[in-house]
Image (cartoon, grey):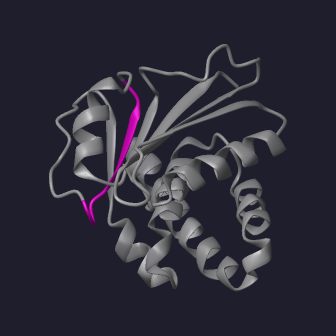
Amino acid sequence: MASTEVLMAGFGGQGMLLSGKLLAHAAMEKGLEVSWLPSYGPEMRGGTANVTVCISDKPVASPYIVYPRALLVMNQPSLEKFAPRVKPGGLIVVNSSLVPVKSDRQDCQVVYVAANQVAQQAGTGRAANLVMLGVYVGWSEVVSLESTVRAIEEEFAEKAKFIPANVAAFKAGYEEGRKARGAKS
């Protein structure tokens, strides 16, 4: 496996830091080298929040990445700020439930997913971040569906009633990512 970097961004409270943590956990379970670098504003909710996850089969030289291979965005300011930085040939996943504009990147695959609606259909409107993570994992196959589900189960072990809907949201996103990857081929 070559190394990869993904930047996940949105407003505080949208769960992107958690999604990054789950991806890092699943990658560690696979025996890969991982760095997880969160960045957030001073606000409790509503401020900016993003996380960079680097995954490699070799030690990660730096957790700070300017030009990621993939970007997951939950809001328009994040799309505008970070989309220009994605490496050509990369992936941009946009939550079209909250982002009304389209990316102008022609050199990347852009996947639009109505993550809020997909999460609601899966049983919880609060799991749009897990839909987005699912799209990325399904498209990239950087970690397995099973290892990510285990990471979700471990993260929510003390709140077990939330596990089924969160796993369902992740799996629904995963299927969207697999479809997008198939459409790319």
Give residue 109's quadrant in the image.
top left
What residue is shown at x 46% (from left), y 28% (from top)?
Answer: 69
Q: Residue furthest top?
A: 61
- In the picture, measured across the screen, residue 91 lies left or right of residue 81, that is right
* In-front residue for pair 48/25: 48
- In the picture, measured across the screen, residue 32 lies left or right of residue 12, that is right
- In the picture, measured across the screen, residue 98 lies left or right of residue 182, that is left
Which residues, given as a range, are shown in magenta?
89-98
Residue 87 sits above or below residue 150 on the image = above
Q: Is residue 112 magenta?
A: no
What residue is shown at x 76% (from left), y 54% (from top)?
Answer: 147
Residue 143 place in picture, x, y as percent: 69, 45
What residue is shown at x 40% (from left), y 60% (from top)?
Answer: 45
- Image quarter in which the N terminus is found: top right
Give residue 82's quadrant in the image.
top left
Residue 99 place in picture, x, y as percent: 22, 57
* In-front residue for pair 3/75: 75
